[in-house]
Image (cartoon, helix red, strand yellow):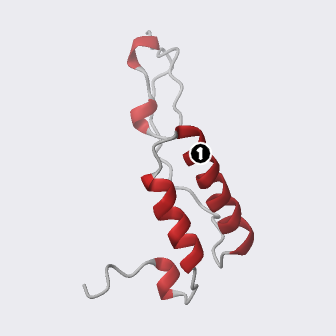
Amino acid sequence: MANGPKTLAWRVGWSIPQLSQLTKQAAATSDATKRRELYREIQTTVMQDSPFVVALQGAQQVGLRDNVKGAQQSLGVSMLYFDQITK
C-alpha cells in the first residue's frame, strides 16, 4: 500500500506525527528503562488525547465439571495452567 498501511488513527483523522515519531523512538531504544518511560508517555498521551475509548475486551469461557479443582483462568485460555488442576 502506498505510504504504508492505513491505521485506525488515519481512518478517524487523528494526525499524530509527534506521537508516531515517539513510538518509533521507543521501538528503537535498547535501554529498557528509557523504553518503558517512552511507552508510558505514549500511553498517557493516547489515554488523554485520542479519539478512542477502549470499552470492551473479548473473553473466552471454559466449562469445568464440579470435581475439577484448582482451575483459574486469566485473560485468555492460554493462561490456564494445567499443572495446578486436580480432580
User: Residue at coordinates 69% horizontally, 66% vertically from top-left?
Assistant: 45
Please say if 45 is above or below 16: above
Q: Is residue 44 left or right of residue 30?
A: right
Crowding near the residue tagged with mark 1, few <14, some 14–19, many ≥20 C-alpha atoms within 10 Å: few
Q: Which quadrant does the C terminus fall into? A: top left
* Image location (x, y in percent) of residue 1: 25, 84
Q: Nearer the viewer, residue 50 or 17?
A: 17
Type of the residue with mark 1 = Lys
Residue that mark 1 sits on:
34
- Using the rendered view, name the quadrant where residue 43 is placed: bottom right
Residue 36 lies in quadrant: top right
On screen, 64 above or below 75? Answer: above
List the single residue furthest toward the right.
48
67 vs 16, left or right, is left
Q: Position of residue 18 (x, y in %)?
A: 58, 75
Q: Hey, which quadrant is residue 72 in on the image?
A: top right
Residue at 46% x, 40% y: name it.
Answer: 76
Question: Which of 31/84 is in front?
Answer: 31
Q: Position of residue 60 (x, y in %)?
A: 46, 46
Residue 24's x, y, as percent?
Answer: 46, 63
Residue at (46% x, 12% y) in the render: 84
- SS assignment at label 1: helix
Front in this rendered view, residue 50 or 66? 50
Q: Nearer the viewer, residue 37 or 74?
A: 37
